[in-house]
Amino acid sequence: MAKLTSMKESLTQRVIVYGPPKAGKTEMVSKLATKYNLLWFDLEKGYAPLFKLPQEAQERVRVISLPDTKDVPVAIRTMLKVVTGEAGSICEKHGEWKCAICAKNPQAEFEEVHLRGLDASWIVVLDSLTQLVDSALNHVRGNMPDTAKSEWDHWAAQGALISKVLGAFQQLGVNLAVISHDVEVEQEDGSIVLVPVSGTRNASRNTGRFFDHVLYTRVSNAKHKAGSATTYLNKILTGSRLDIEIEKMEDASLLPFFDPDDPVNQAAKQKREEAKLKASSTLSKTSGVAAKLALNLKKPGS
């Protein structure tokens, strides 16, 4: 068992950016390519904002398309293989892991993938978790008619598959940026809160546990806005384990969450250190008072 003082902070981060459609989620994540290499898993042909990037940044992006449909839920099948961390290939035509059909075609093109081989200069992007959730449900429904209603077992199996993917990312130790939409859920106290979609409302309630940072994007006064502090907005789930407050940035960026040398990251770190020193000082004073009181109690006549 290691002491906390002997452990180092993680060099990789997991971020989820969620919100309503057209709220700037994809564009915000894409701008990470100004400094990082992006391994972009595109599940819904939503990579158009990537072409807004400068040419130099575009060179840092590898897009792997997974043409997911209701009849061919390839996204969940392939991502379950990807998150094992093992080396493999994904065919460009079908988005299948080690595609048996394309393996017979000498002209078929493949993308090599090996998450365990990525260093801290890479960020894996999943666009989007919403589509992966749909893919998981279509996968477990199999050949059921479209008119057939999904039962409890289907929803449970869907949740298990999504948890398997997100849980695997936790253990892989790679930088991760996930894009998702929002959904209203009811909390235990009866209040309604917006959270990232990750399946049923019950499953979505716990999405945040898989991530270090949960960011919400929205459109306000014809501008894209984003927040990450736990106190950002009432009834919207947000938070950052590094206490980074993206809403205070003039030009909101995800770089501070991944770059430890970023000024915003450094400022948040300094605030954490100051809070730690203050807490330590308070504890020392409290301990001193307690020790003095105990000494007085031991004196004769006390």
Image (cartoon, rainbow, N blue to C red):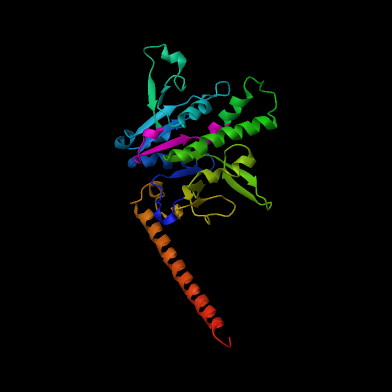
Q: Tell me the quarter of the picture where residue 102 sits.
A: top left
Q: Residue furthest front?
A: 300
Q: Is residue 178 or residue 220 the one in the foreground? A: 178
- Locate the C terminus by quadrant: bottom right
| Location of residue 256 with respect to 77 vertically, above or below | below
At 39% from the left edge and 21% from the top edge, which residue is drawn? 110
Q: Position of residue 211 (x, y in %)?
A: 49, 45
Q: Position of residue 134 (x, y in %)?
A: 58, 30
Say if the magenta span includes residue 29.
Answer: no
Left or right for 153, reference 57 = right
Q: Position of residue 185 (x, y in %)?
A: 64, 45
At 54% from the left edge and 85% from the top edge, which residue is drawn? 299
Q: Residue furthest left?
A: 56
Query: Bounds of the magenta span?
Result: 115-133
| Location of residue 1 with respect to 141 vertically, above or below | below
At 61% from the left edge and 40% from the top edge, which residue is drawn? 203
The answer to whether one can see residue 43 in this image is: no
Q: Residue furthest bottom?
A: 301
Say if the magenta span includes residue 122.
Answer: yes
Q: Tell me the quarter of the picture where residue 122 sits.
A: top left
Q: Position of residue 108 (x, y in %)?
A: 39, 15
At 47% from the left edge and 49% from the top edge, which residue is drawn? 225
